Image (tube, grey):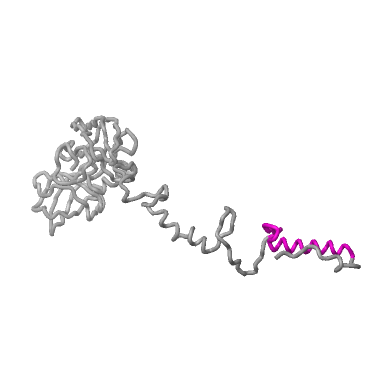
Amino acid sequence: MPLPNQLPKRNFDGVDPDFQQWLNQLTDTINYHSGYNGEIEFADHINMKGKNIKGVGAPVDPDDVISSAIASSRYSAAALAPQLESNQATPLKSYRQMNNKTQREQQSSWLNDLMSAPPSANNLFPTITNVSGGVQVSLPSGIFQFADGTSVKLQGRTDLLSLPAQYAITSLAVSGGVVTYNGAATGLVAGEIMTVAPATNPSYAGTFQIISSSSGGAVLEWQDPGASGTETSGNIQVNGVYYYAVKKRTTFVSLLGPFAADTLQNRLQVNFDGFAIVAVVVVTASGGQVAQSGGGGSPIVGSPTAGSFF
């Protein structure tokens, strides 16, 4: 109940009139801060000295204060979580719903940026022709299809590839599955790959990784359980594999190489810069090897077949 701001005159007979005015002002102030004159406005903040404000009602207007109970029931993580689920009416706009068939992508262009991602289709088969002093390779222009189903028409190109370096074999011998080479200094070191082309003993033929090298590469060792007998002629060849590759979203085909051998590691190295392999060409001292060269996107599987990746 508000305080009256006027008292009977008889109570103030002989009292200075200013006192009556002061009392009226004091009474109005008390009534105002008690809320009897409408909303209370403060000239400065309220400092509760660590005490709580209790009994706050449910909010009605946008600027109403809310209680911790109201805040928890409406805006806490537990309260919002059901509303953001993928099967609710208000999921996050950027939320990818893994089980939502309407959002499932059949193709995704981000696959184009993956390293070592082979094309799903490729009909760019190189033409290999032995010419004086080297091998001529012509790659026709054509459609190249990326992993996401998109495609690009690549430019054709023609290159003259040099024959690989070769070093004469003085002797090959095997003991316990380890072959020892003696011959011309190759400069090869352990870990590098080379191809053995014997003249008379085919059991030594193949591509191998060197496990030991000395005397500037004039003495080499590698593992070959299939080797037998000896060999005193033929040669060792290196640097004879070339890759044709295309970088994402370009039409120009790049020529990368030479590499010592066509291996998964070398193919991965070619793809480290975002390239996808279009074709591979294998060159030996005797010329281009059609059976080991080709175009396509399949990984190394099975026996070499002309016109396909092996």
Kindly tell me whether residue 114 is visible in this rendering: no
Q: Position of residue 131 (x, y in %)?
A: 19, 30
- Identity of the residue drawn at 17% across and 51% down: 181
Span colored in magenta: 16-44
Q: Which one is nearer the viewer's eye here, 106 or 251?
A: 106
Q: Position of residue 234 (x, y in %)?
A: 14, 44
How many numbered discs? 0
Q: Which one is nearer the viewer's eye here, 28 or 109?
A: 28
Question: Image check: 41 left or right of 151?
Answer: right
Question: Is 68 above or below relative to 142?
Answer: below
Q: Is residue 36 magenta?
A: yes
Quadrant holding the N terminus? bottom right
Residue 77, quarter of the rendered image = bottom left
- Identity of the residue drawn at 29% across and 41% down: 148
Q: Position of residue 146 (x, y in %)?
A: 28, 39
View extreme (right): residue = 14
